[in-house]
Image (cartoon, grey):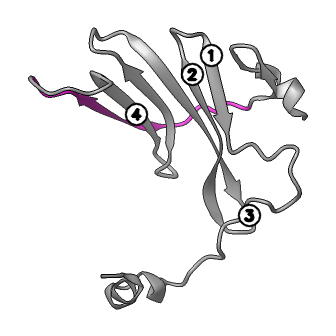
Amino acid sequence: VSYDQLLTPFHANPDYMRYELKRVWIAEAILKEGQRHLYGKRRIYVDEDTGLTAIAENYDGRGELWKVVLFNNIYDYHGQAYVRRAQMYHDLRAGAYITERLINDSAPLLYDINPMKGPAYFSPSSVRKLGRR
């Protein structure tokens, strides 16, 4: 699908989006009393199967939903792992959104993850060798 077909005003064209009912973990962060931050509260929905964020809700200091992020995660059969593809950031007050990581009009394999590493790669000694001081 071309970008012109997918990226409609205000949101992506739902005819080209794929949604799937999944179990999620919900993490909620509320700003501590006396602290300052752009968001007063954030709620993050994490896909139970992949550990990747599926949706993020960002609330203003008054507790009103302000910004929403939709993450499109897919299984990369080549890399044998779930990876994040398009991310759609919606500003509900402005009625605008921005999308990144789209590869529809790109050359094949523009985005590719490294091949799977064996268990030894994740051992404490291997991680120490990869670190920098």
Evaluate if marks 1 and 2 touch, with contact meaning CB atoms under 8 Å apart: yes
Above or below, 40 against 95 in this view is: below
**Percent x, y for residue 39?**
32, 24
Q: Secondary structure at mark 4?
A: strand
Mark 1, Cα crowd under 10 Å, few <14 / some 14-19 / many 20+, is few
Q: Earlier in the sequence, mark 1 or mark 4?
A: 4
The stretch in magenta equals 18-33
Above or below, 130 against 20 in this view is: below
Mark-to-mark CA distance, 3 and 2: 29 Å
**Percent x, y for residue 16?**
81, 28
Mark-to-mark CA distance, 4 and 3: 26 Å
Q: Earlier in the sequence, mark 1 or mark 2?
A: 2
**Which image quadrant: the N terminus?**
top right
**Percent x, y for residue 126?**
40, 88
Q: Which residue is mark 3?
A: 77
Label 1 amino acid? Ala
Mark 2, Cα crowd under 10 Å, few <14 / some 14-19 / many 20+, is many
Q: Which residue is mark 1?
A: 96
| Label drawn at residue 90 | 2
Q: Is residue 78 magenta?
A: no
Q: Which residue is mark 4?
A: 44
